[in-house]
Image: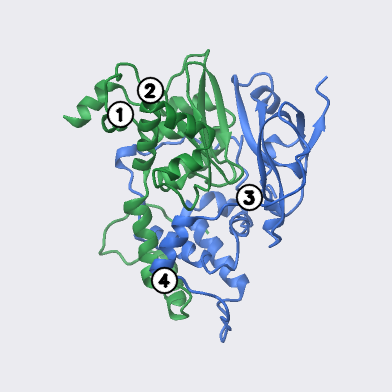
Amino acid sequence: MNGGHDLGGKQGLGPINPEPEAQEPVFHFEWERRVFALTMAAGMLGQWNIDQSRHARERQHPADYLSNSYYENWLQGTETLLNESGLLAANVELGNVRIPDSADAEKLLACGGPTTVDSDKPPAFNVGDGVRLIKSHKAGHTRAPSYAQGAVGEVVGQHGCHVYPDSNALGEHVGEQLYSIRFSAQELWGSDAENFEVLIDLWEPYLEQVSTA
Amino acid sequence: MPHDHSRDHDHTEPPSDLTLRVKALESLLLEKGLVNADALNTIIDTYEHKVGPRNGTQVVAKAWSDPQFKQALMHDATAAVLELGYGGRQGEHLHVVENTDAVHNLVVCTLCSCYPWTLLGLPPVWYKSAPYRSRAVSEPRSVLREFGTELDETIKIRVWDSSSEMRYLVLPARPAGTEDWSEEKLQQLVSRNSMIGVELARSPTSAEDLSS
């Protein structure tokens, strides 16, 4: 879905106004600290994955997504996931849900979770191939940014087989080949664009081969 | 609904709706036993005090000083920085992209806020903001100018949109005049912003000022 989060190339959003690096705290308010920790800790319950978590934030009304601060969007997403998970119901049976303590949390943060998936299927595209990011208007979660849909780029890297976000957001853990695709600014933004290139990581189902002749 | 984001630190004011909403959620989760209070503190402490851009500055300074490490880093950054003890959440698949005389790299996540936490900590507010996320892929030179970074027109800008779980770290160019500098001293030249690509590494003279 191309909700309020799908921001590449959107205009009229104003200056960046970066806070000077030396003066910026990690959190600006106590509530941000709490939202960050609650979101991470709730995620460690293992009831949803990172793509479901992203999708929960993206499903908000675009006007809310854009007017909320960053951690307000996290809060909104976490509330949505908790409500949908059923964990907050009265008499919920926690069964096998393990509640991480301090040591568990430390370990989970230190280990991370690689997203590679074993696969026997060879990549369909090779470095140097011309590919188009297929246009799509599906409602669910995707990591194919709308600003590059329909554009033709070149495969410049193969990252191997990784969890496919569009399925992962539905709770289906399947892998697809992931590539680094290079697009010229002219292809994305027209002939008046500044001279630069954009590299986007895109999964095989997003792409179709084009003739480079 | 939108909220008032005024930077109100006056503790005599009643707590904002937002503060109350977060408190309510935390109380509920604690009461239901779904989160552990010590775990919350550990999570905050990790990213407020332990994991931050200092990790990245060590990686960059080492890459500038040690050709063998740099080679390993460019080949497989995840494995190379694990040797230094940097692994974990949001650093599972790292790629280092090198700035040269011909190429300048810039990292963004247009769809959310993907960022190499293991090396840089949590992203700054501007990195997660709509203006940066929208403009970095469509007008990078104007974005760089907002950070005071002017690049020669002949330098190719390469923008990395972090759309997957690959995490990108920019290896800034080593400033001239630092040939005899130790790794520790070189670290002072590496700003967080230079590892995102919105700035260059600091000049040796500015670092002398910092340490004096």
Q: Marks 1 and 4, how far apart in space? A: 39 Å
- Chain letter for blue, please: A
Q: Name the residue under label 4.
A: A101
Q: Which amino acid does label 2 sit on?
A: Arg
- Near mark 1 (Cα within 10 A), the count class, few <14, some 14-19 or many ≥20, is many
Q: Could you classify mark 3 by the number of other residues whose Cα lies within 10 Å: few (under 14), some (14-19), or many (20 or more)?
A: many
SS of the residue under disc 1: helix
Residue marked by disc 2: B174
Q: Are marks 1 and 2 on the same chain?
A: yes
Q: Which residue is drawn at 38% across and 23% down?
A: B174
- Give the residue pinned by disc 3: A116
Quadrant location, the C terminus of chain A: top right
- CA–CA distance between discs 1 and 3? 35 Å
- Residue B186 is labelled as 1
Chain letter for mark 2: B
Chain bearing tag 1 is B
How far from the left and from the top, in percent, is residue B178?
29, 20
Locate residue B175, reporting x and y percent. 35, 20
- Quote the CA–CA distance across marks 3 and 2: 33 Å
Left or right, B17 with respect to B159, comes to: left
- The answer to whether marks 1 and 4 mark residues whose Cβ atoms lie closer than 8 Å is no
Q: Chain letter for green, please.
A: B
How many angstroms separate mark 1 from mark 2 (CA)?
9 Å
Decide which of tag 4 and tag 3 comes sooner along the chain.
4
* Disc 4 secondary structure class: loop
